Image (cartoon, rainbow, N blue to C red):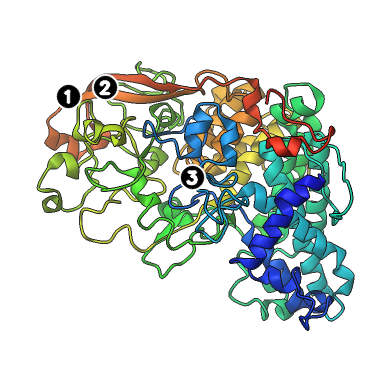
Amino acid sequence: MKNLLTKVLLPLIIVLGTGSLSSCKKYLDRSPIADIKATDPYKNFRNFQGFTEELYNCIPLLTLSNAHNSWNLGEDEFWELGETRIISYHIDNGNYFAWTDAYYNFLGPDGSGSADGNANGTGVNIGNKGNLWGLAWYAIRKANIGLANLDKLTDATQEQKNLIAGQLYFFRGFFHYQVMQYWGGLPYIDQVLPSNEVIKLPRLSYQATADKVAADLKKAAELLPVSWEEYPDVANVTQGNNNDRINKLMALGFMAKNYLFAGSPLMNRESTGSSTYNTEYCKKAADVFAQMLQITETTKRYELAPYAQIRDVFYTWNKQNLIPGLKESIMHENLAGASGRFLYNQVNDYRPLVIHLSGIKVYPTANYADYYGMANGLPIVDAEKADAESGYDPEYPWRNRDPRFYNDILIDGEKCVATASSVGNNEYRQYASLFTNGLMRTADGNKKVWTGYMNSKIVAKMMNNQDGTGINIGNTFVMPLMRLSDVYLMYAEAVANGYGTPQSVAPGYSVSAVDAVNKVRSRAGMPGVAAKFLGSTTDFMSELRRERAVELAFEGHRFNDLRRWLLLTERPYTLKKGVEFDRAIPNAQVYADPKNARVRNFRETVLFERQLGPRHYWLPFRIEDIQLYADFKQNPGW
């Protein structure tokens, strides 16, 4: 652990303190000749909040590292063949050590070899925000320094003292959780570790680590208000910047999520040897989620956005850099570069070269598109076969689907370039030519639309650089780390597996597990969970897992969900598929009504199958870290 400090934390302190996060220099790297007293950073609320602000700079940034990034690491996306710079390529191929040096990579240092890249463990370009591993450890140390100096905050009201302490406890727990969800149980660092002593803190089990995370987040929830605007003497100091300040509901939300993960099959197996849900941890999760949702619904601090405005949860366009999220986003990813990250680089990745002239191309897999069931609420059992019960017909594969399918997925025949003249009046460029041998399926080599679908959830359907309208300019994109629909679905999972049935409720809250899922479905215009899935928790979980896949598509949750459910290595979750079909009606009819277009020879083909084993449920630690001392052990199989 001493080596961990010297190789990870201390270099980060030096680099971040002398780089873009210059506030650290003021408080931690004080020159002997400086006239700043050792107590100055902590003596009053304004100063201590300035010290604490740097912790916000360490919040994970998923959607950009360098010029592009890949953060959907499940079976949900297929990147162009041969693109080895992205972390998704290495995850697909089982090379998890690539988290230490993949170029486009939110987990760890990128592989650029630049002065602020691989050499010292921070990401590049976006203010050194792309490195979850390094910044988490840095933030944990900084939180511990703050907590160790709370007694120096004398010139402050009790509310101000509570806010400072609440933020510090939150961030210490939050950043331990951010690391452990990928690497497993950890040594829990709850003190300022000396750099001149040999430190041998053993790795705890996942659940033991989760208990310590929960204790810190519980303290944070007790100290923090629902909104900082409740405290006028504080709100005046931080006015205009309070929406994303850490609050009680964030603390409760991550405390409950931490318990749910601890109770999930993977984490329970790591801790107890049992590959089932842990009932007690699920109950703890359900109870805290219930408390959070009760406060949320009473105060209306957060609310489900109307589905007509769902795009504003993720990005805004030409709204003077307004941060998206509405009242549904509870906590955002790092806001660095929000108005530029989907400008000329990442935004290019979602359309083929024939309408978007650059980019590393990525498309939704056909098997993931199949999770979007029918408008009557029933799933698609087999995309190649008609199903009388659900009404699905492979001759009309996009008819009567879940409304979220039409929002999130761009299908064959949909208009994706507004002005025909801008693409030489070429209909196959103006309208998505995604049928077998269509232009977008054959042009551009490895950058073609391999899967037969394009993403329209996090970019607009008309997102291209052909029209001269500047539609890719003016985007402000930020991904929620937690939003309210996610909380309802996690509550449902925790209640069903903790209290036993889809109809169960957590004490003190009247919403059942199935009621919570139906809140999310009804917002999108979908009927509730069908009765056939309500007879047992096992049946209910099959629909709940599908609901999470649909509602949270492309938001970075799928990989960890598959891992914690112990499904990552199981078919069909190892497959990435494309769809093949021929148009059966004239093109003009397809363009007029693509949702109801008839096709022939509809079939799915396997583009890639992951060859993953038990060791791929956890990321490996760096070799230099597991060589520190015997009790700091590597994850199994690595």
Chain-order first, disc 1 or disc 3: 3
Q: With respect to residue 537, does 280 lie above or below?
A: below
Query: In the rendered view of the protein, which quadrant contains the N terminus?
Result: top right
Residue at the outermost bottom position: 35
Q: CA distance from mark 2 to mark 3?
A: 39 Å
Residue under pointer 1? 584
Q: Amino acid under label 3?
A: Tyr
Please name the residue shown 21% across and 38% down the image: 593
Q: In the rendered view, does 587 fall on the left or right side of 492?
A: left
Q: Are the residues tagged 2 and 1 within 8 Å (C-beta)? A: yes
Chain-order first, disc 2 or disc 3: 3
Query: In the rendered view of the protein, which quadrant contains the C terminus?
Result: top right
Chain-order first, disc 2 or disc 1: 2
Question: What is the crowding at mark 1: few (fewer than 14 residues within 10 Å), some, or many (at least 20)?
Answer: some
Q: In the rendered view, does 115 fall on the left or right side of 2?
A: left
Q: Amino acid under label 2?
A: Glu
Residue 525, position in %: x, y? 44, 43
Q: In the rendered view, does 404 fall on the left or right side of 587?
A: right
Residue under pointer 2? 395
Q: Nearer the viewer, residue 136 or 530?
A: 136
Q: Are the residues tagged 1 and 3 within 8 Å (C-beta)? A: no
Please name the residue shown 30% across and 43% down the image: 351
Residue 508 in view here? no
Q: Are the residues tagged 2 and 3 within 8 Å (C-beta)? A: no
Q: Nearer the viewer, mark 2 or mark 3?
A: 3
Q: Secondary structure at mark 1?
A: loop
